[in-house]
């Protein structure tokens, strides 16, 4: 899991570069680890994304829109790659495992991804989106939403980059699913990686929903529900989910160390 952070930071660096925002890979990697730490206290992984946007925008004054656009697009492409991986998983599991009920969940995310892609990249949709401006101004969110939209829309002129980021994300998610499978093996769940390529992508998507802090209870319930359909008892299924939670905690440890070091250095300088 830790080894996948560097390619994700490199992916983000490429998205920033085409918008004229040049940042060191080491700092972007550090920002990812800090975001994982923040994600332990904020609802869903989106909370960590907000921290990345805030920190990077502070380093590049006046470029908040492109920065937000790069992070949001990165998340959207990650979701699309996750759905593609889920589709492959379903094809592999067809006829071997009874997971048909989860097709509805995947279908919902597929539909949402298509709608968002059209909204962000189609020029024909812009007049329709413009009709929402009075309402957005009324609730005082028009400026940040416009900045994020323009930041994402600008990438429609870089299809090669978008395809490359999508492909890299697909490879990263493929590796990350194996971490879930290994967590199951550690608690005695005797299943091949195949069903985890159905469950893993859906888990990554479900954890994006702002239901609880850091996906607590949502993650474990999902494991019990999904693995229960495959004959895994509730105790082992819960233990698999909890152990994967421990893995994510370990992933946030470098960020916690970095934050503690920066705080201590700032205190000494003061």
Image (spheres, rainbow, N blue to C red):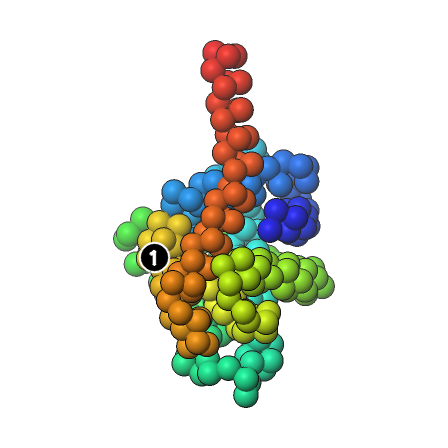
In the displayed structure, would residue 85 be above or below residue 31?
below
The answer to whether any part of residue 152 appears in the image is no
Quarter assignment of residue 25: top right
The residue sitting at 55% across, 66% down in the picture is 82
22 left or right of 138? right
Residue neighbourhood size for the residue with mark 1, other residues' Cα within 10 Å, grouped as few (<14), some (14–19), many (≥20): some
Spot occupied by residue 94 in the image (x, y as percentages of width and height): 55, 85
Spot occupied by residue 153 in the image (x, y as percentages of width and height): 55, 60
Marks counted in the figure total: 1
Q: Nearer the viewer, residue 268 or 73?
A: 268
Q: Nearer the viewer, residue 242 or 15?
A: 242
According to the picture, the residue beneath numbered tag 1 turns out to be 217
Q: Nearer the viewer, residue 104 or 70?
A: 104
Spot occupied by residue 264 in the image (x, y as percentages of width and height): 50, 19
The residue sitting at 46% across, 59% down in the picture is 240
- Dot 1: element: loop
Quarter assignment of residue 179: bottom right
46 left or right of 168? left
The residue sitting at 49% across, 54% down in the picture is 244
The residue sitting at 36% across, 53% down in the picture is 216
Spot occupied by residue 58 in the image (x, y as percentages of width and height): 52, 34
Instruction: Work out which residue is located at the far front of the displayed protein and give it.
Output: 188
Instruction: Work out which residue is located at the far left of the displayed protein and give it.
Output: 138
């Amino acid at each position: 899991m830790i080894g996948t952070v560097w390619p994700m930071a490199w992916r983000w660096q490429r998205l920033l570069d085409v918008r004229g925002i040049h940042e060191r890979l080491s700092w972007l990697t550090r920002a990812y680890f800090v975001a994982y730490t923040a994600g332990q206290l904020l609802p869903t992984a989106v909370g960590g994304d907000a921290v990345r946007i805030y920190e990077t925008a502070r380093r590049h004054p006046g470029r908040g829109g492109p920065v937000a656009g790069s992070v949001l697009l990165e998340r959207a492409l990650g979701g699309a790659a996750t759905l593609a991986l889920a589709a492959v998983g379903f094809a592999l599991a067809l006829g071997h495992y009874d997971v048909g009920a989860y097709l509805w969940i995947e279908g919902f995310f597929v539909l949402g991804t298509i709608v968002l892609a059209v909204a962000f990249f189609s020029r024909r949709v812009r007049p329709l989106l413009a009709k929402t401006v009075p309402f957005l101004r009324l609730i005082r969110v028009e400026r940040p939403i416009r900045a994020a939209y323009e930041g994402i829309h600008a990438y429609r002129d870089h299809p090669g980059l978008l395809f490359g980021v999508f492909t890299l994300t697909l490879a990263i998610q493929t590796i990350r699913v194996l971490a879930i499978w290994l967590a199951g093996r550690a608690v005695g769940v005797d299943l091949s990686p195949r069903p985890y390529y159905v469950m893993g992508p859906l888990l990554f998507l479900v954890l994006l929903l702002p239901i609880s802090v850091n996906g607590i209870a949502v993650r474990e319930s999902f494991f019990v529900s999904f693995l229960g359909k495959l004959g895994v008892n509730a105790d082992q299924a819960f233990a698999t989910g909890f152990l994967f939670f421990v893995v994510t905690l370990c992933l946030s440890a470098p960020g916690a160390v970095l934050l503690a070091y920066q705080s201590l250095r700032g205190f000494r300088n003061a």
